[in-house]
Image (spheres, rainbow, N blue to C red):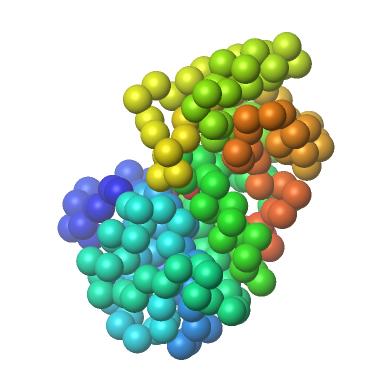
């Protein structure tokens, strides 16, 4: 996971990520259990949580990388099965629309991220402004697949649309493979999410549209927009 110290010269994207991650803290109910996503924007969130010890009672993590970062920040990590109530999950995205539809999975953690989004009463997505798009699909759509079905799924997708490229060398925390589908222009995200999810061998589609974000926070170097 990327860790960028505050003193390091920041690009606009990094400054936006830091700002939006810090702004997200005001949505956290003190003493609650928080679902925590994965990625460099979430790394800033964990840094902000570390600076507010005791703000949350514990976290549920979406990846081994996030679990390591949370523990290093002194935050207790619970298994989702131990948690009765998950009021909020905060996570980043690779692309987001004003309709709260997302592409996620650039970091390969899409399955556990989708589980946390499903479990949480409220799902807040935090992105820097470069991630905000009119139409999803410029960022290749990640799909987690059972390894033995990788070529079968790739052929099935390519018979419909796009080019499904194997993210070679990457094995997810669940022991699976990732295909990245290039060349999409996604006009109806919930319907594509449902259709791709029905292909045998697909574990998780990196579209978060059937269960979209409830709130989208967009950070820039100068402020945060709430959508
Ligand atoms: C990981 C994800 C991340 O949320 C997404 O890749 C955005 O990452 P970053 O905050 O580093 O730009 O879906 O699976």
The residue sitting at 57% across, 23% down in the picture is: 149
The one of 89 and 128 positioned closer to us in this rendering: 89
Is residue 90 shown above or below 98? below
The residue sitting at 34% across, 76% down in the picture is: 76
Is residue 17 shown above or below 148? below
The C terminus lies in quadrant: bottom right
Question: How many numbered circles does the render carry?
Answer: 0
The residue sitting at 63% across, 65% down in the picture is: 119
The residue sitting at 70% across, 54% down in the picture is: 212
The x, y position of residue 91, in whole percent, is 51, 57
User: In screen coordinates, is 117 left or right of 55?
Assistant: right
The one of 4 and 84 positioned closer to us in this rendering: 84
Query: In the displayed image of the protein, which residue is found farthest to the left?
Result: 7
Quarter location, residue 137: top right
Is residue 223 at all visible to an observer of this figure? Answer: no
User: In screen coordinates, is 118 left or right of 111?
Assistant: right
The x, y position of residue 175, in whole percent, is 43, 38
Is residue 95 shown above or below 50? above
The x, y position of residue 41, in whole percent, is 41, 53
């Amino acid at each position: 996971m990327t860790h960028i110290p505050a003193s390091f010269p920041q690009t606009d994207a990094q400054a936006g990520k830091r700002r939006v991650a810090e702004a997200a803290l005001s949505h956290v109910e003190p003493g609650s259990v928080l679902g925590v996503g994965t990625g460099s924007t979430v790394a800033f969130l964990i840094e902000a949580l570390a600076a507010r010890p005791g703000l949350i009672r514990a976290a549920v993590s979406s990846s081994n990388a996030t679990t390591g970062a949370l523990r290093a920040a002194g935050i207790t990590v619970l298994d989702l099965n131990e948690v009765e109530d998950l009021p909020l999950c905060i996570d980043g995205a690779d692309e987001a629309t004003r309709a709260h539809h997302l592409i996620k999975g650039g970091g390969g953690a899409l399955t556990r991220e989708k589980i946390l989004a499903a479990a949480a009463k409220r799902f807040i997505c935090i992105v820097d402004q470069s991630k905000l798009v009119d139409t999803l699909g410029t960022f290749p759509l990640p799909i987690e697949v059972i390894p033995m079905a990788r070529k079968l799924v790739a052929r099935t997708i390519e018979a419909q649309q796009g080019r499904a490229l194997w993210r070679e060398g990457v094995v997810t925390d669940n022991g699976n493979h990732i295909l990245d589908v290039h060349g999409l222009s996604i006009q109806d995200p919930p319907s594509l999410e449902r259709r791709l999810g029905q292909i045998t061998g697909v574990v998780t589609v990196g579209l978060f549209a059937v269960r979209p974000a409830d709130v989208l926070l967009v950070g820039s170097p100068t402020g945060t927009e709430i959508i």
